[in-house]
Image (cartoon, grey):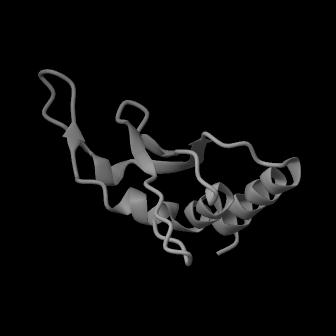
Amino acid sequence: MTFADTTKLRVLYHVVQDFGGRSKFIVFYGPSSPHTYDAIEFLAGAYKQYIDTMPSSEAGSEGSQSFTKSSELMFTGRIFIYYEDSLMLAQLGQACGSIWTKRYWR
C-alpha cells in the first residue's frame, strides 16, 4: 500500500482455509513502519477484497466423490493483524473499534 507521503508498505496476508470446518479467516502481517496505525485502519475496511481475490481451490477426503470448494467456505469474521511496532493504548482501542465498526455496520 502507498500513503499520501509516497511511503510504501508491503503487508503480507494469508487466508486460512479450514475445509473440514467449512470456514476461513484472514491473517495480516505488517513490518515496522511509521504508518502502522494507518495500515491497520485501511485493512479494517479492505479485508474483504483480500479474501475475494484468493484463487479458487477445493478439497475432499480420499475416496470421496464430493469436494468442498473454497468459495463455499464461510468467513468466520476473524481477522488477525500482526505488526512489528508498538501502538499507544488509545490507538489500539481506536483500531479495534474501527475494525468492529467496519466489519459489522456496513
Q: Residue at x 47, y 70 (%)?
A: 2
Q: Residue 48's x, y, as percent?
A: 47, 63
Residue positioned most to the bottom: 4
Q: Residue 102's x, y, as percent?
A: 66, 68
Which image quarter is the C terminus in? bottom right
Q: Residue 92's x, y, as percent?
A: 79, 51
Left or right position of 66 against 26: left
Q: Which of 13 and 65 is in front in this view?
A: 13
Q: Which residue is drawn at 72% across and 59% down?
A: 100
Q: Which image quadrant is residue 24 in?
A: top left
Which image quarter is the N terminus in? bottom left
The number of callouts visible is 0
Q: Which image quadrant is residue 67 in?
A: top left
Q: Which image quadrant is residue 14 in?
A: top left
Q: Which of 42 and 60 is in front in this view?
A: 42
Q: Residue at x 34, y 35 (%)?
A: 19
Q: Which residue is drawn at 13% across and 33% down?
A: 65
Q: Residue 89's x, y, as percent?
A: 86, 47
